[in-house]
Image (cartoon, helix red, strand yellow):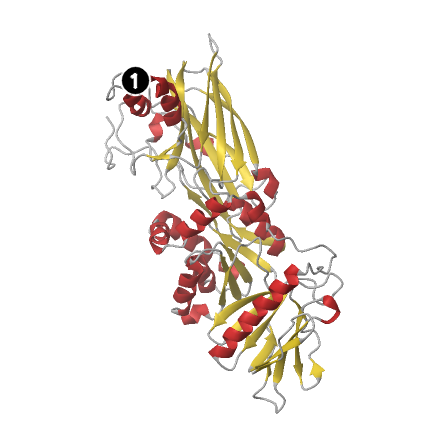
Amino acid sequence: MMEGSAGLKHKHLEFTLAAVSELSSSSVSSSSSYTPVIARFSADGGVAELRFRQGSEFIDGFNVDLGTAQLFKLGPVKSLCVSESSETNKERPYSWGVTIEFRNEEESRDFHSAFEQWKEEDVVQGTHLPNGAISASKSKFDNKIEPSSAKMYFHYYGQLLHQQNMLQDYVRTGTYYAAVIENRADFTGHVVVDVGAGSGILSLFAAQAGAKHVYAVEASEMAEYARKLIAGNPTLGQRITVIKGKIEEVELPEKADILISEPMGTLLVNERMLESYIIARDRFLVPNGKMFPSIGRIHMAPFSDEYLFVEIANKALFWQQQNYYGVDLTPLYGSAFQGYFSQPVVDAFDPRLLVSPPMCHVIDFTEVKEEDLYEIDIPLKFTASVGTRVHGLACWFDVLFNGSTVQRWLTTAPGAPTTHWYQIRCVLSQPIYVMAGQEITGRLHMIAHNAQSYTIYLTLSEQGGILQTSSCKLDLKEPYYRMSQPQPYTLAQDQQPHQLLQAQDIPIHAEDLEEPELLQQPSENSGAQLQ
C-alpha cells in the first residue's frame, strides 16, 4: 500500500512493508506487531531520504540518504538497500545496509520504481553528499574507459559460452579451487567480496570454504545467471549476495576480510581489470585483509622463431601485387607489413625457442596504486645462451595465492599445462643477430588506453661487436590468435637446450615461497615430439 506521491520534493511517499532489518540484525516485522512498518520517501530540508517508522515513531538509525544509496533485488519480495554512512557517524564508519521484505511482488516492483524516481530527482537537483561534494555523474571507470569498449566488454562476459570457456580451463579453475579450499582458515567465518564474479563460481568456492558471507559483484548481464546458479545451490547460496554493478560504483553493507577475483588478462594487464581489483581493495578491504591472488609477475625472454617471422611477413605479400584488376597495390605494402607486426601473437610455444633465461616484473596487488598501472616501464637485460637471430620478446605471467596455510601459484608459462591465456610474443619486423654470451638490452614500455588495453613499445638491442637495435609498436587490444598447442621446431645445430628453471626462483620479499617448476623441458615421451 502506498500513499502520496505528486511533487516529489514537496510531498512524501509511503509503503507498508512485511519487515525491515539492518543487515546481520534481527528484523522489525509487521507480523510481530499490530503496528505496521512503513517505508517513507521524503525530501525534508531539500535532501531526498528514505526512513522507516512504526506508528508515529521513526526507527533510529534507519535513515537512508538517496544521494548515496543503491537498491538491489535479492528475490521476488526481498531487497537490499545499501548506503554510505556520514563521516560523523562514529558507530557506523563504513557503508551499511538494510534488508527490506515486501508483502507481495507488485509492491516490491512499485517500491523499486519509486526508489529510482526519487533517486533520479535527487541527482537532478544536485543534492550535496555528507562530505559536501556533488555526486559525480560518471564513475572512475566511466571516466577512463571508452563507452563502446565497455559495452562490448560486458556483452562478451555476459554470455555463458565465454564463461564456459574459462570454466573449462581446468588449470585456471582447479588452481583457484585448490587455493581456496586449502586455505579454509582464510575464509571460514569471514566476509568475502568476489570482484567481477562472472558465473559466481569463485563465490561458491568461498562459501564451500566456510565464508560467513560473500558479496559477488558483477557488472555484466552474467549477474542474472550467477543468481540462478547460486539459487540452485541453496546450501551455499544462502551466504552469497549477487550485486549487479561496477565495483567502482556499488556500495556494500560491510567491509571485506578477503577479496577474491580473476582479473588477469593476456600479458596479465590486458582488459585493465587489475585496476578494478585495486579499486576494490581501496574501497572495501579491511586493513591487512587478504587478496586472492596477491601478487602477479610478468615474465619475459627473447626468442628465436624463423617460422613465425616468415609467416607474419608473408601475410603482407598480397600487397606486393602490381596488377590487381589493373590496380597497383604496392603503395600500401609497407603499411600492411608494419600492421601485421603490430599484432602481438597469442599462442603456446615450445620453451626451447627462448634464447636466454627469463626475467620478471613483479606487481604486488596489496601495495600497487591504481595509477601505477596506467604506465608500466620495464628495462630489459638478458644474456644470450646461444648464437641465433632474435625475433622478439616472449612473455607470460603467473600469480600467487599467498594463503595462510598453502602458497599456490597459477602459471601460464611455456612448457607448463596450457591455459586459455596461452603465452604472448611481440615480434620485431627487423630481427637482430646475437652470439652466445652477448648481452641483450632494451625496454618494454606499456601505456594504457581507453579501449581497456595497452599500447606496447618494445626495443631490443645487441651490445656485442656491432650495435644493433630494433623497435616495434604493438596494440595489445588487437592480437593475432595463432594456435592452441605448441608445435615441433627444429633446433639449430649450435643451439643446445638450456635450463631456465633457476631463473624463475626470484624472491618476492624476504619470504622463501615455494613455487612450481614453470618451464619444464619436454620428455622424450611427451606428446609433442621435438626434432
Looking at the picture, which amino acid does disc 1 mark? Asp
SS at circle 1: loop
Q: Nearer the viewer, residue 267 or 137?
A: 137
Q: Nearer the viewer, residue 81 or 360?
A: 81
**In this rendering, would 174 be left or right of 526?**
right
Q: What residue is shown at x 48% (from left), y 30% (from top)?
A: 456
| Front residue of 427 and 452 | 452
Q: Is residue 507 visible?
A: no
As displayed, is residue 216 above or below residue 387? below
In the depicted structure, whether residue 48 falls above or below residue 155: below
Q: Residue at x 33, y 23 (%)?
A: 309
The answer to whether residue 312 is above or below residue 205 is above
Residue 140: x %, y % from top left: 59, 48
Mark 1 surroundings within 10 Å by alpha-carbon count, few (fewer than 14), some (14 through 19), many (20 or more): few
Vertical side of 166 occupied by 322: above or below: above
Say whether residue 432 is visible: yes
State left or right for residue 52 relative to residue 427: right
* Snapshot quadrant of residue 232: bottom left
Residue at 49 percent across and 76 percent down: it is 77
Question: In the image, what residue occupies the spot 56% across and 48% down?
Answer: 141
Image quadrant where one finds the N terminus: bottom right
Q: Which residue is mark 1?
A: 328
Tell me the quadrant of the picture where the C terminus can be found: top left
Q: Position of residue 24 (x, y in %)?
A: 59, 72
Residue 82 on image: x %, y % = 60, 66
Residue 74: x, y in percent?
49, 70
User: To which quarter of the image does residue 430 belong?
Assistant: top left
